[in-house]
Image: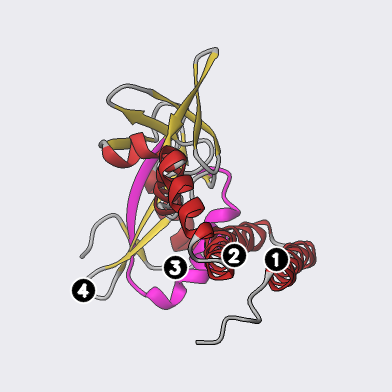
Amino acid sequence: MNLEHITWAYFLRVLIVLIVLNVIINGIQRAVVNSLKRKLAKQKTNRFFRKLKLIYLPLSLVILILIFVLIDYKINGIILLASIVFFFPSLKNYFSGLVLQFNPLLTKGAYLITKTLEGEIQSLNYFGINLKSGNTEQYLPYSNLHSNSFKVDYKIHGVTKKIMYLQNPEQKEILIDSLFSNPLVDFSTPPIYVPKDNGSLQIEFSLEEGAQLEQIIDYLHQKEINVTSNTC
């Protein structure tokens, strides 16, 4: 295998290309979001680009690391191994976070409960989660969360989680638009959609405190959207 073309100059060119691609992705995201009028569409678009960038960043790092090692696999390989050992806790947090950040329940504003900590999620960072409990803020590394059980409670901050069933899944987009326009529905946590064996679609979503599921079902029936509180 001819590796003569893999030099520091080549590394620099690849780095510049990856940075430019990242700038382009961010520019496309801003342009698309600004062109959308519906808030729900903007939220969906931001979530899509956020997941795209969660994949793009580690992929870019892997490419750069591979080129770095190929420039001089003896010396740079030893440097890489030493770096992995030295930065292992941070790397463990980072890659645990990549997995956990694809969990739709872990969003800003959700109330997270673990064996040792609990609080409202303030932000999801590269290496951990900032939680707010009362007047104090706490930091939870992703590796701690990944290795222990946790749950998300939606009833603590004026929000309750409800489940209903859409009998005609083709009405999904109409249902989402209708839910978003209803002030009783809380969209700080994205709804979860689960196809059922009988052909219906289970929707798990959040309601503001005091709101009843029956109110939402009646509201959707007025729009001729066939939903029920059970699978039948």
Of residues 183 and 15, the one nearer the viewer is 15
Q: Secondary structure at mark 1?
A: helix
Amino acid bearing label 1:
Leu
Amino acid bearing label 3:
Ile
The residue identified by callout 2 is 64
Answer whether residue 183 is magenta in the image: yes
Does 151 appear above or below 27? above
Residue that extends furthest to the top in the rendered view of this protein: 135
Give residue 198's mark.
4
Instruction: Report crowding for label 1: few under 14, some 14 to 19, many 20 or more residues within 10 A (C-alpha).
Output: some
Residue drawn at x 59%, y 65% is 64
- Ranked by sequence position, the earlier of labels 4 and 2 is 2
Q: Secondary structure at mark 4?
A: loop
Question: Which quadrant of the view contains residue 168?
Answer: bottom left
Asked if the residue at tag 4 contacts the one at tag 1, i.e. Cβ–Cβ closer than 8 Å, the answer is no
> Depth-wise, is mark 3 or mark 2 nearer the camera?
2
Give residue 15's mark.
1
Report how far apart the C-alphas of labels 1 and 3 lie in the structure.
Answer: 51 Å
- Ranked by sequence position, the earlier of labels 2 and 1 is 1
Q: How many marks?
A: 4
Of residues 51 and 159, the one nearer the viewer is 51
Image spot of residue 60 (x, y percent): 59, 65
Does 123 appear above or below 36? above
Question: Which quadrant of the view contains residue 86?
Answer: top left
Q: What span is in magenta?
A: 160-185
The residue identified by callout 3 is 225
Image spot of residue 119 (x, y percent): 44, 25
